[in-house]
Image (spheres, rainbow, N blue to C red):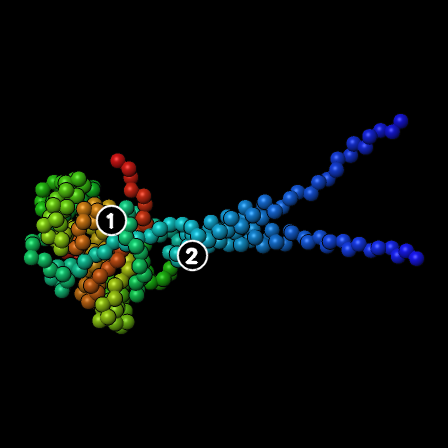
Amino acid sequence: MQLKDTRREIKTIDLLPLINVVFLLILFVLIAGRPSTNHPSGLEVARSEIEATHQGAALSVWLKQDDVFYLSDKQPVTLGELAHLVKEKGLAAQGLPLELIADRRAHAKQLLAFRRAMARAGVGEIRLKTEIIAAASN
Amino acid sequence: MQLARRQRRAGFMGLTPLIDMIFLLLLFFLLGSDFVTYGQSRLAPPRGTGGESSAAPPVVITLAATGALSWNGAPADEALLARETARLVAQNAEQMLVLMPAGEADIQQVTSVMDVLQGAGAQSITLERDVFDIDLADF
């Protein structure tokens, strides 16, 4: 008597659907995402419901949670030095705006001091960077 | 004479390197992308520094560290701020609004008040220090 061979036949898995899905994911990330910003670690900008398009500025200054201004991640700067830099670069003379990327937990006194110091240095417009959140529904 | 017919076998193309590369690309874009949308709030120059000037007297809004608001000295809430700002802006589009936050208020509180004012149509918002919050060390 011949018994039927019950060994399972190994079937190949069709990989094309997997590749398709992964390509779709890449497309999604490419379209929905944008290159990540180079904020210093731990800096959380203030949230806003106003959808104003973010435009770059000639000079970006960071204000971290410790109420200290920075020009780069590890380069603290005083308002006097900033005013000197603004004059040196001729930002005020060219009427170029300045961008302040401030941590939402920093204190308003630093924002006021920055506003006043930059106005004295001749800077007209200051742009405060915000993170747009969806407006809460009533 | 019969010659054996040699059939060409289709060569098997390994898909594993392709899949590896696609996953690496996916990882790269996932880690290198930012899904947050950024905006900005414009701060007008302080009064008396050569900024825009409006014929109408500016409105002074104070913000305490507790979040309490006032409109020209009278206690107010966000709804009143929005209503009064919309009324003034309808009369004069360049109405200057002076926001005086307490030094200990945080920037999120300031941004939230500016949101209310901008949402009501204000275009000229400036920041000034509250006269009762001046630090003598500045002098």
Distance of mark 1 from mark 2, alpha carbons? 25 Å
Q: Is residue A77 left or right of residue B44?
A: right
Q: Secondary structure at mark 1?
A: helix
Q: To which chain does the residue with label 1 belong? A: B
Label at residue A10: none
Q: Residue furthest top?
A: A1
Residue A15 vs residue B72, the one in the foreground? A15
Q: Secondary structure at mark 2?
A: strand
* Quadrant location of the C terminus of chain B in the rendered image: bottom left
Q: Is residue B7 left or right of residue A85?
A: right
Label at residue B111: 1
Residue A109 visible in this rendered orientation of the protein? yes
Q: Residue A25's spot in the image, x, y percent?
A: 50, 48
Residue B42, by quadrant, is bottom left
Instruction: Quickly name the residue at label 2.
Output: A35
Q: To which chain does the residue with label 2 belong? A: A
Name the front one of labels 1 and 2.
2
Q: Residue furthest front?
A: B1
Q: Is residue A5 left or right of residue A43?
A: right
Q: Count every numbered label the image shows and give the total.
A: 2
Tell me if residue B124 comes above or below residue B80 in the rendering. below
